Image (cartoon, rainbow, N blue to C red):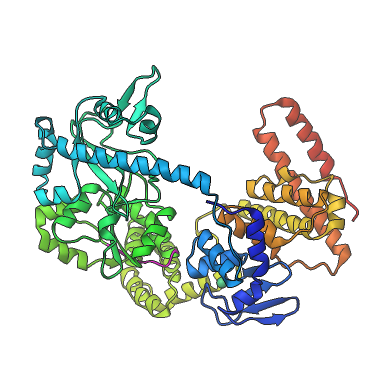
Amino acid sequence: MRYSDDIIEEVRFGNDIVEVINSYTPLKQRGSSYIGLCPFHKESTPSFSVSPDKQLYHCFGCGASGTVFNFIMDIENYDFLDTLKYLADRINYQLPSPNQKTDDKLLEKKKILYDIHKLVAKKFYENLLTPQGDIAREYLDNRKIKQNVRTKFGLGFSLFKKDDIYTFLKEKGYDDNIILESGLVIKSKNNTFFDRFFGRLMFPIIDTQGRVIAFGGRDLTNNKSSAKYLNSPDTPIFNKSYNLYSINIAKNTKNKELILVEGYIDVISLYQIGITNVVAALGTAFNENHIKLLKKYANKVILLFDSDDAGIKATLRAIPILIQNGIYVKVVQIENAKDPDEYIKTFGANNFIKFLNNAKSYISFQIEQKMKEYNLNDAIQKVDFTKEVSNIISSLESPVERDVFIDEASAITGISKDAILQEINLILSNNEKMPKIENKRINKKNNIQNNKLEEAKQSIMYILATNLNIYNKLKKYINPEDFIDQVYVKFVSLIYEYYENNLPIYPAEITLKFDDIEEQKKISKVFMQKIDFSNNDNLEKIINDQVKIIKKAYFDKVILEEKNIEIVQKALKDKKLFENLYINL
Ligand SMILES: [Zn+2]
């Protein structure tokens, strides 16, 4: 549910950003803003700036940026709604009760969908015991999955009958609409209804409150035309990106540690040997959205993916997502087996547990993977490898940890610790000066041009948003679409709309017009730039240059992508015009 913009604005208005932030990190006034040590990254000289006029903060060290809402969300790890409640409480502001009517309707629908899933889970479970279920029981027998574990996970079977579940639910009195919304039944083009799952081993997906919210189904026919695994689609009670398989069991983890595996069967075979803090993503790669759920129960994660290339890729992909969210990561790489289940079957539970206890740090894992890409007997490749490794190690915040891995990298490469340390210090000092740029081999020239364009856009947006006179001079030359990036286009459109309606522009209010947190940060950064208006002659020239850069990029894009030849011709003509234009401010 979402509160209206007016309410958000009132809560924001009551919570002065300087006061709020000052209670987390002491701020000192400097000129028109306040500065302090950034609470989001380690630093000894303050680069964290808070503007009382704009009601925004920005860190010139790590790039953290936003409104008072973003600050509380990041520092307290709250979602937006919790933040709103917290800030409303802080000023004794009574939030109105949510829109009861639509809420009730949705709740009612969800309740029916939970009921349907419960009934169907029970039916699948019973199917497993029928003669048709032989094939599924055989599969489980081969996998050595014990009866009590089958019951614990509620494993079941969908019959080889295309409308079994549909007929079953109709008999229970459910109408077609709600049956379709459950995702368990599909309607074909000629209006016949058939089940999503048939002839599959069924894994109920259960939420933290113990409710069945979806199913995963494994094909047992080895029929090449059907997918090996099939999952429920997203429904009002299930979103695959926000749920994890077996979280209902794993949430009881004692030491705030979760093991992330690839498949349902891995979860179950680990459970069977007494390891219960295991989860798997559901037919989607592990992603940012999973973090919110995971963080409620764990601050440590062990990645235990398959030993193939896909597993390694998935591991490398998950590491930064977890690290950035403050989760401690270890990696276990399966050896001599393709997945955990096979390992346990081949080498036994005890060996597996030993193996698990030797999980290595994600840094070692990353270094080992990098090693595969380089020939360390080649001097040039060795230097490149060292740079890559230094880059990985420089991501560690603790100097002690860095030291440990410098030793390791030096032992592997034979390059002196001093040389690696120097490389790391160079990276760290550059990181402090610049916003983080991904460390990839990029075409340098292109990159400089892109930086110039981005800089021009940001500066012109800032000028438009903060200076009505210049806006009036520029508005006939520059349009929101010129900024290409959808967030910027929306931002500039908003600014134009505010001016044309004679509304005052409050930077924090404009920032909160964006729903997405990343978008809010992007806009906050635009407002928090340091631009010097003191030298007017120079400013006029700078603005002219920047407008030209933006217009040129826009016209180039039109010329490249537009199919309508007349529009292309006009763009070519306008591009020429702009090259020779000078706007007097
Ligand atoms: Zn910072």
Q: Is residue 173 magenta?
A: no
> At which x and y percent is residue 143?
12, 46
> At which x and y percent is residue 174?
34, 31
Residue sitting at 9 percent across and 58 percent down? 348
Residue 20, image quadrant? bottom right
Kindly give the residue lying farthest to the right in the view shown: 584
**Lateral position of residue 486 relative to residue 323, left or right:** right
**Lateral position of residue 438 relative to residue 20, left or right:** left
In the picture shown, does residue 175 fall above or below 579? above
Q: Is residue 378 visible?
A: no
Towards the viewer: 376 or 211: 211
Towards the viewer: 282 or 285: 282
Which quadrant of the render holds ligand 1?
bottom right
Give, as a single range, the part of the protein colored magenta.
325-331
> At which x and y percent is residue 25?
57, 79
Residue sitting at 72 percent across and 50 percent down? 494
In the picture shown, does residue 345 fall above or below 10? above
Towards the viewer: 88 or 567: 88
Residue 349, image quadrant? bottom left
Quadrant in which the C terminus is drawn? bottom right
> At which x and y percent is residue 209?
32, 55
In the picture shown, does residue 308 fall above or below 62? above
Q: Is residue 19 visible?
A: yes
Give the mark count: 0
Kindly give the residue lying farthest to the top in the view shown: 190
Q: Is residue 326 magenta?
A: yes
